[in-house]
Amino acid sequence: MMISYVLDGKGFLITNRSIVGDDVQNFEYSPKPEYDVGMFTVFNEPDEKAVLDKFFGHIRDTRPFIYTTFNGDFFDWPFINDRCKQYEMNLEEEIGITLSANNEFLGRFAVHMDCFYWV
């Protein structure tokens, strides 16, 4: 498993070294000229729990106000939520994201916009 995300125009990739064969070095990536993300900082973590810990810690440190995903309600958040259960972690306790009665993941401290609904 890997988690990649962009915060304030800076890219990040967290790799699970129990799955990825070698350390991944920081790299430059911009999918199109109008999306100038640039350098991605890579965190090579020893296992899946460390990947989740690193992601949650980074979210707590940076405190984003908006999470923008594409199909996050039906893939990203459910996947992360399921993996948390393997380690007796709770997504809501970690970063304030919870599944609503409408099967949408909502943030207690930040808005979640799933672009799948309108793109």
Image: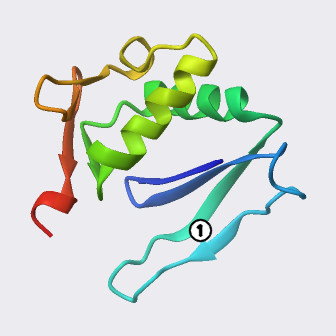
On the image, numbered disc 1 is attached to which residue?
A: 39
At x 40%, y 11%, the residue is 93
Above or below residue 24? Residue 51 is above
Q: Residue 44: x and y, percent?
A: 78, 46
Which residue in the rendered view is the most extreme toward the bottom? 33
At x 45%, y 17%, the residue is 94
The amino acid marked with disc number 1 is Met
Drawn side of residue 91 relative to residue 48, left or right? left
Drawn side of residue 72 relative to residue 60, left or right? left
Above or below residue 90? Residue 112 is below
Q: Residue 32: x and y, percent?
A: 40, 87
Q: Residue 26: x and y, percent?
A: 72, 63
Drawn side of residue 72 relative to residue 9, left or right? left
Above or below residue 30? Residue 81 is above
Above or below residue 98? Residue 34 is below
Secondary structure beneath dot 1 equals strand
Residue toward you, 31 or 71? 71
Q: Dividing the image into 4 quarters, which one contains the C terminus?
A: bottom left
